[in-house]
Image (cartoon, coloured by chain):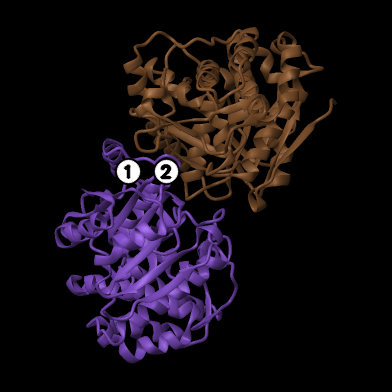
Chain colours: A purple, B brown
């Protein structure tokens, strides 16, 4: 069996391990039983992922002595909403869910966010485990305890902080992930490298194509490093009152673009790529960021096949969209600004006035 | 101005004060501005309470420089549900709610639970303040951070732990509270005395009638003592994994009775009175509780006008109702058992088998 990489998210009594490796899905039952007092596990997934891995995960859970069953939710970020949460409550109570029931989120970020929020709020909080099956979920959304659902007014407007008990990232599941989805996940790796780790940024520049091909000699270490950055940031600032805000680099404009596209035809990572390049370019023009940073970012994103230019909506449309960003303070708009790769200007995002938005 | 009593709920960075006194509603704006960084406050209340105190609270908030507005939710525990939460999200976003917006729960336990849960989940958590206007809310639900709403399947099945930033209990608001509501609130005071404080129990026995008449020489001290017990228990065990479970004394059967009555015609405190007397009587019969304890409890409840005998549903109906209690573990039923007043047998509730339910 190949090496299992282990990252600890350090949050006192809410600490938990993130495991990264091959064939992890088959041992998940034992790990859950060892790490939690669960008696029943309910796997929440979407049909395509459930068809592929559902029975393996159920077998692993039952093999460890857990009562186990599976609930499918419809695929797509559009269904990450309160109606699905209410349906999950119903389905879980029907299965006799109690405080010894554990939810298992099997899938990408949407499944993790929806399952996590359900776990955070059913019976005032039951445990859950993340089994991410996308690059994005492995390096970003499965770690850190942000859970949430969308409202018609915007994305992730409802949610809570609820840490998982365990994250198992089985890298074998990435083999069936379409290239565009892979790239969108790497956008978050690029982001973490940009705000935190110039060596990782350089490693991505050396190996973009091999990583897109999921080279087993390179990929697990890169995922581990990205998870380590996320774990470090989250440990220092679980509730995004300080340093965790840095993880929003590129996200102010990404949210605006996603909202203007009505969350269709654009993956979150693609919007983040556009948003990072935009933020760096604008901050260079304002003399805040070292010249050349945005070009380096754009080139790296391009090698992963990520888009880097904003769609051609009117400036006023962008301003409108930015105004509903939930991270605004008054009428100013918050952007995370880097001085250069790995160096950030301040922990607090800079407040841009509308005039400064190009 | 009369004395303000102050109890601190000690939870590290989530600590907050509970203030008890006269004419507190008029100073709530300054206290909020001093204690939080809020810029906007939205008061959530029910129409009868809003008509009585809404404009005073809005004046106090605006006087302290806050943007302030009010949202009314329909009265009654039946509307403490997910639909009302969704309506609150909409109304708050329409008012431009962001992370500098603070919710103010003005009313009884229903308003506090609903507002608290909305605050816990909007934008992954915004601050809120409790202005309880019932005995029950002052001595119990406003302190400790339990928030939640009902599902068709049962009460408080959805919720989370989200501590308020401040609790202001203005005892003047109790003057208009109907006697039955007052008594239901005192049931929770009796419960706290029973599990924690024989001296308070004796004080209640000395002064039941004067307390029901809201004697200003006695009432604030009794409310303060009840809040102090709650604060102490919550500080030791915020998430009800140990000693906080004691606060469920009487609640196993109370929930069953409420469910059998479909939450109609019975106040929560009345069900708790029945549940405490039942639990003590049953535990006496089983030789777990000092003989005479249940009689003392029943007599004290009776002097507050609280019912102490369970309604005459079939035994099988009770067993069915107990099974859906969310605090069950497997098929056993958890009861908090006292050895005598102020002395509990164990922190962990005793697991009664169905056979032991009389």
Marks 1 and 2: same chain?
A: yes
Protein chain holding label 1:
A
- Answer yes or no: is residue A242 visible: yes
Q: Residue at x 53, y 15 (%)?
A: B270
Expressed as whole percent of the image width and height from the top left, the position of residue B116 reads 53, 37
Mark whose residue sits in front, 1 or 2:
2
Of all residues, the one furthest to the left in this rendering is A51
Q: Quadrant of residue A358?
A: bottom left
Say which of B199 and B282 sits in front. B282
Protein chain holding label 2:
A
Q: Which residue is mark 2?
A: A121
Q: Residue at x 38, y 48 (%)?
A: A119
In the displayed structure, A65 sits above or below B214; it is below
Q: Quadrant of residue B22?
A: top right
Expressed as whole percent of the image width and height from the top left, the position of residue B154 reads 37, 28
Check disc 1 and report its element: helix, strand or loop: helix
In the displayed structure, A88 sits above or below A203; it is above
- Residues at circles 1 and 2 in contact by the CB criterion of under 8 Å: yes
Expressed as whole percent of the image width and height from the top left, the position of residue A40 reads 31, 47
Query: Closer to the N terminus: mark 1 or mark 2?
Result: 1
Say which of B74 and A226 sits in front. A226
Quadrant of the rendering where the N terminus of chain A is positioned:
bottom left
Check disc 2 and report its element: helix, strand or loop: helix
In the displayed structure, A278 sits above or below A68; it is below
Q: Residue at x 42, y 39 (%)?
A: A123
Q: Is residue B262 left or right of residue B214?
A: left
Mark sitting on residue A85: 1
């Amino acid at each position: 069996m190949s090496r299992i990489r282990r990252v600890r998210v350090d949050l006192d009594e809410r600490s938990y391990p993130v495991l990264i490796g091959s064939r992890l899905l088959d041992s998940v039952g034992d790990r859950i039983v060892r790490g939690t007092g669960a008696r029943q596990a309910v796997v929440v997934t979407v049909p395509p992922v459930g068809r592929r891995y559902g029975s393996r995960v159920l077998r692993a859970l039952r093999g460890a002595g857990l009562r186990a069953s599976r609930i499918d939710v419809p695929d797509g970020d559009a269904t990450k909403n309160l109606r699905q949460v209410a349906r999950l409550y119903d389905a879980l109570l029907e299965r006799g869910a109690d405080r010894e029931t554990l939810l298992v989120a099997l899938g990408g970020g949407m499944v993790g966010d929806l399952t996590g929020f359900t776990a955070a709020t059913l019976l005032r909080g039951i445990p859950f485990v993340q089994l991410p099956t996308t690059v994005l979920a492995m390096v970003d959304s499965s770690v850190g305890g942000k859970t949430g659902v969308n409202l018609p007014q915007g994305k992730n407007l409802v949610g809570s902080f609820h840490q998982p008990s365990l994250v198992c990232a089985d890298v074998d599941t990435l083999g069936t992930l379409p290239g565009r989805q892979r790239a969108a996940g790497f956008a978050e790796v690029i982001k973490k490298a940009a705000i935190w780790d110039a060596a990782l940024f350089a490693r991505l520049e050396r190996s973009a194509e091999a990583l897109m091909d999921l080279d087993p000699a390179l990929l697990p270490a890169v995922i581990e490093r990205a998870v380590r950055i996320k774990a470090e940031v989250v440990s220092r600032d679980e509730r995004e009152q300080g340093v965790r805000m840095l993880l929003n680099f590129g996200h102010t404009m990404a949210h605006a673009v996603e909202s203007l596209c009505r969350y269709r035809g654009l993956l979150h990572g693609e919007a983040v790529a556009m948003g990072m390049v935009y933020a760096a370019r604008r901050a260079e023009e304002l003399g805040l960021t070292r010249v050349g940073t945005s070009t380096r970012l754009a080139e790296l994103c391009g090698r992963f096949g990520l888009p880097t230019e904003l769609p051609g909506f009117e400036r006023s449309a962008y301003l409108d969209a930015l105004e509903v960003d939930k991270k605004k303070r008054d009428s100013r708009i918050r952007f995370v600004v880097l001085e250069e790769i790995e160096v950030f200007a301040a922990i607090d995002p800079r407040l841009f006035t509308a005039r400064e938005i190009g």
